[in-house]
Image (spheres, grey):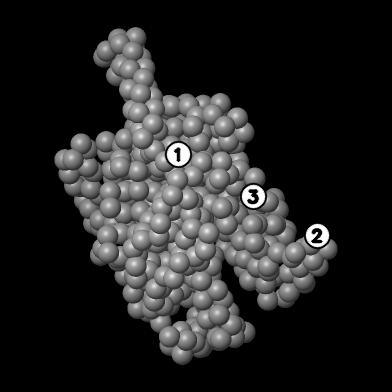
Amino acid sequence: MGLLSLLKALQDSPHVALLESARAGGAWNRFSFIGLGARRSVSCEPPMVIEEVDGVRTGRRVNFFDFLKEETARHISPAFARFGSFNGGLVGYFAYDLANETGVLRKNIRRDGDAPAAFLVQVDDFIVYDNRLDRSHVAACMYVDRSRPLADQYRETAGRLEAMERDIIERLARTTLPYLPSRPAPLAVSFREERGSFEARVGAAKEEIAAGEAIQVVLSMRADICEPVDPFRFYLKLRMVNPSPYMFFLKQGDRHIVGSSPEIHVKVEDDTVYLKPIAGTIPRGRTARENRENRATLLADPKERAEHLMLVDLARNDLGRIAAPGSVRVDRFMEPEDYSHVIHLVSLATCALGEGRDAVDALRETFPAGTVSGAPKVRAMELIDAMEGRARGIYAGAVGYIGYNGRLDTCITIRTAVFDGDRRYIQAGAGIVHDSVPAREYDEIVHKLRALSLSLQFARENTIEETARAADYR
């Protein structure tokens, strides 16, 4: 059974979460995960945290990150590496305006009233797909009740696994994959802002930078998808044309969040914290020689180097707030790294978690990423809130999981489409510095949005749907 057939078979479930990853060059990492059958969800609707269990909602007035620390303290599981790093936990998104819960802002930024500031599902039952062996495994978490015989609990969990397997096999028997059309279909995408308006915002940001208010401000623009699009088919196309380190398909009731992000937000594994700033981009060449020349050009660009250095410093500063003394390091610095269509400048900053610190602290202290806000981060976010004039929502936040085994893996929510009822949109940004050229910054954002909209054109709901084999998408 192929991974995409499994995902298609589960589309009528209320909550589905697919997380997978492609290495530089496009080869898939060994394990992909599909979380399913979630009975419990947790959402942040400030000042409340809402829990829903089997359809019953309860609320509590509590800081969301404090809630997550309580949650991970009472759900503890061993790290079981045989099938990868995810062994059960909370999976979902953290919106940009969750920054209001971090406690570092002087004034709250705008909230997206149409979606929670975070929405996570508790994944106890999941599928682990082994891309190397083309084999799937079902997995279930067993919560130990010390007042009951362990053997009885083991049998109950084994029964859950057997029921999951039967259900999946029955679903697969009824499942066919759609062919994507050979050519893109016309699709109406409406940019929220005209060139002149955006360039004026760039000019205003440059004035603030010249006045010493910031070093960089990342301004973004949204585009509305004006026609129905099938999120599943969009993911199929995105997966084919832009395999990335973080691929995700989240179905949360009527909401779908589908993306292909190149960039870690923050990762915690074995008490080590990882940040991987990406700044500096050039297209890949058509030949190995062109690639070498493009890497050299990128490394020699003073503007790209200066921006990258600033973000590495910001990453080191973020890590310093949670690190064991003397443990912050830059293990890789400003190295060109190949992706499916572009070459990025990449660094890797790490630290050991300080005493009393955990994965939730790592998320809180690094949120949101400097690469989508700017520097200094707090002032840049204040300027963004004033200049963009609307809540960013899910864009520029994070997607990923908080594992009950102490691990965390999240990416920055970029190169992502959000489908939420009648709201369907994509969003992209550009980092504004003192010598930015407004017209070029606008062109950069339009280029990013059009690259995403091309994949959307293959997923229009009114295109003819034929069947395909999973092998057609691998």
* Labels 1, 3: front one: 1
Q: Is residue 84 above or below residue 437?
A: above
- Taking the image as shown, residue 2 lies to the left or right of residue 440, namely left
Q: Tell me residue 379's x, y (percent).
A: 45, 73
Question: Residue flagged by tag 1: what amino acid is it?
Answer: Ser
Residue positioned 22% across, 53% down in the render = 48
Nearest to the observer: residue 413 or residue 464: 464
Q: Which of the two discs, 1 and 3, labels the residue nearer the N terminus?
A: 1
How far apart are the two marked residues, 3 and 2, measured between alpha carbons? Answer: 16 Å
User: From the image, which quarter does the C terminus lie in?
Assistant: top right
Please state which amino acid type lies under the numbered disc 2. Ala
- What is the number of the mark on residue 26? 3
Label 1, secondary structure: give it: helix
- Identify the disc placed on residue 5: 1
Give the amino acid type for the residue marked by disc 3 in the picture. Gly
Would you place residue 283 above or below residue 327 in this image?
below
Where residue 316 sits, quadrant-wise, is bottom right
Residue at image location 41% in from the left, 82% down from the top: 193
- Number of dots carrying numbers: 3
- Location of mark 2 (residue): 288
Alpha carbon separation for disc pair 1 and 2: 35 Å
The crowd level at tag 2 (other Cα within 10 Å; few <14, some 14-19, many 20+) is: few
- Is residue 315 placed above or below 214 in the rendered structure? above
Q: Residues within 10 Å of mark 3 (few under 14, many from 20)?
A: some
Mark 1 vs mark 2: give the one in front.
1
- What element does badge 2 sit on? helix
Residue sitting at x 60%, y 54%: 276
Sequence-earlier tag: 1 or 2: 1
Name the residue nearer the viewer: 357 or 188.
188
As helix, strand or loop, the secondary structure at mark 3 comes to loop
